[in-house]
Amino acid sequence: MKISLPEEMQSVQINEKWGQEIFIDIRGFIKHAVEQAVKQELTNFLGYEQYQRGEERRDNYRNGYYERDLLTRFGLIEDIQVARDRNGEFESRVLSRYKRREEKIDRQIH
């Protein structure tokens, strides 16, 4: 015996699935954009491009990244790679040091 859902219910499930896929894509885009913006901020802060060699002596260098999660209205974005410098002087304006939620969500909480 085969049971099928009414046509109206089938379209709702399809729309929900489609909506979830859109949110996944949006979260991926946001993650990529934030990571690239932070890398560019670090480049501007240090004054040289990644892997750029020169004769001048540098007092500070890139030092990999750490991972951070960010809660947005599109859901949780996990493992955002936040670039860092060796001396610990760099602080991103895009993703401030202790930011874990999008500002819009913070306003809804308070």
Image (cartoon, rainbow, N blue to C red):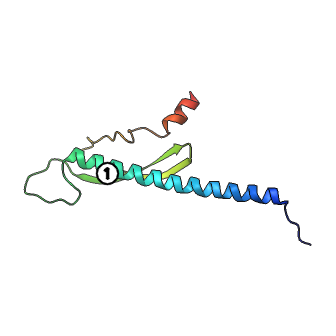
Q: In this orientation, which residue lies closer to the viewer: 17 or 7? A: 7
Q: Residue at image x 9%, y 51%?
A: 57
* Callout 1 secondary element: helix
Q: Residues within 10 Å of mark 1 (few under 14, many from 20)?
A: many
Residue 38 in the image: state x and y as whole percent.
34, 48
Q: Is residue 12 left or right of residue 61?
A: right
Residue 83 in the image: state x and y as whole percent.
33, 50
Vertical side of 84 occupied by 54: above or below: below
User: As drawn, which residue projects farthest toward the top?
Assistant: 110
Residue 27 in the image: state x and y as whole percent.
51, 52
Q: Residue at image x 53%, y 43%?
A: 72
Amino acid type for the residue under numbered disc 1: Lys
Residue to which mark 1 is pinned: 39
Quadrant of the frame with the N terminus:
bottom right
Q: Is residue 9 left or right of residue 55?
A: right
Q: Residue at image x 38%, y 38%?
A: 96
Quadrant of the frame with the C terminus:
top right
Residue 41 in the image: state x and y as whole percent.
29, 46
Q: Residue at image x 30%, y 48%?
A: 84
Vertical side of 72 occupied by 36: above or below: below
Q: In this orientation, which residue lies closer to the viewer: 69 or 44? A: 44
Q: Is residue 102 left or right of residue 63?
A: right
Q: Is residue 5 visible?
A: yes
